[in-house]
Amino acid sequence: MKEIGLVGVPYSGKTTLFRALTRIGTHGGQANHAIVPVPDPRLAVLAELERSRRIVPAQVGFVDVPGGISSAQGIARLREVDALAIVVRCFGPDQRPAKELEEVRTELLLADATVVASALEKAEKRARGKLTDEVAALRRANEALETEIWLREAGLSPEEQRHLRALAPLTLKPSVVIANLEEGAEVPPELPEGTVGVYAAIEAETLEMDPEEARALPAERGVREPGLERVIAACYRALDLVTFLTTGEDETRAWEVRRGAKAPEAAGVIHSDLERGFIRAEVVSYADLVAAGSFEAARHRGKVRVEGKDYEVREGDVLHIRFAV
């Protein structure tokens, strides 16, 4: 499960967004954390086909840190998440979303600059004048931050990033921008391409409603797709994740894995024993499985492929793992 940290300047509406996305209240003083299911209509379809006894969606965690980047506690908690969602206010007559975004990016950069400079000083003392790989990596990172370049945009090699891993740099994390919009507004053109527009205030109004009313109100206000679905989709793109599926009588389930992962790695997401004892994967696309009506019918139609250890799992693959331990 991946965690997404919400970050923004005061009054950006990030806590309202947190409540709207997770459909829970908040309690001050500590990081607010909620785990929510990832909406995926494919699961219900597969469960009906295979007469599964239960459905298990993938999950994602959202973290809203009171104080955010203005507190040491907030920074420490944000370093633990997998990706950042930067919330900017796009409502009210005094809105300045592009400036807000720049303020947040600068604060994150300064937070990293402090820890990288300190780590570099310590690494140089340990190296006693030698140019170790660690020192070289930290110097490159320090130079980038001093010139106001995010580490994710600094062209660091995987080996250099490895030396930074213990610092958990904020500017090395994938990030998405969320425009917190007022009713009827669109994402301002000055925000980056790919910015996700969400009507947090409208969706927060549905928290106390029954499910049918909760679905109807946003639609009446022109909100075509729930904010949760848009935000999760954007974060999955930023994290470069794909979803694969398993189905059978016991359960139909969604799993996340990094794009480009081979079949044994995907098997390991299900259980470590499956990766260790991986033999092969039987693979069928979601569309082919639904068209056939069942896994066995898809097999008879020749739509189920047998793939080995070098197969890269794709979005929407339905897998049966064969293994031996």
Image: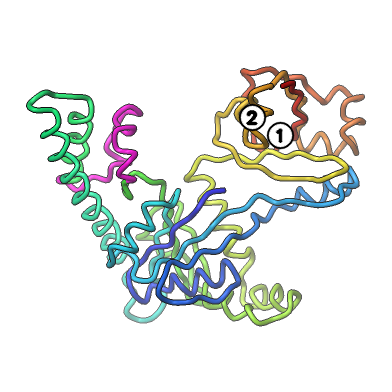
Relative placement, left or right, of 28 versus 101 is right
Q: Is residue 68 visible?
A: yes
Q: Secondary structure at mark 2?
A: loop
Q: Is residue 143 visible?
A: no
Which residue type carries mark 1? Asp
Q: Looking at the rendered structure, which numbered label has been put on residue 317? A: 1
Q: Residues within 10 Å of mark 2 (few under 14, many from 20)?
A: many
The residue positioned 56% from the left and 71% from the top of the image is 20
- Between marks 2 and 1, how big is the CA–CA gap? 7 Å
Determine contact: label 2, label 1, CB under 8 Å: yes
Q: Position of residue 177 (x, y in %)?
A: 42, 57
Q: Looking at the rendered structure, which numbered label has been put on residue 313? A: 2
Pick whichever, 222 or 276, lies toward us: 276
Q: Position of residue 149 (x, y in %)?
A: 23, 45
Q: Does residue 24 belong to the magenta stretch? A: no
In the image, residue 72 sits, relative to residue 138, either above or below, namely below
Q: Residues within 10 Å of mark 1 (few under 14, many from 20)?
A: many
Relative placement, left or right, of 55 versus 122 is right
Magenta-tinted stretch: 146-168
Q: Position of residue 293 (x, y in %)?
A: 90, 39
Q: Does residue 161 belong to the magenta stretch? A: yes
Which residue type carries mark 2? Val
Relative placement, left or right, of 79 versus 235 is left
Pick whichever, 311 or 323, lies toward us: 323
Q: Secondary structure at mark 1?
A: strand
Q: To which quarter of the image does residue 320 belong?
A: top right
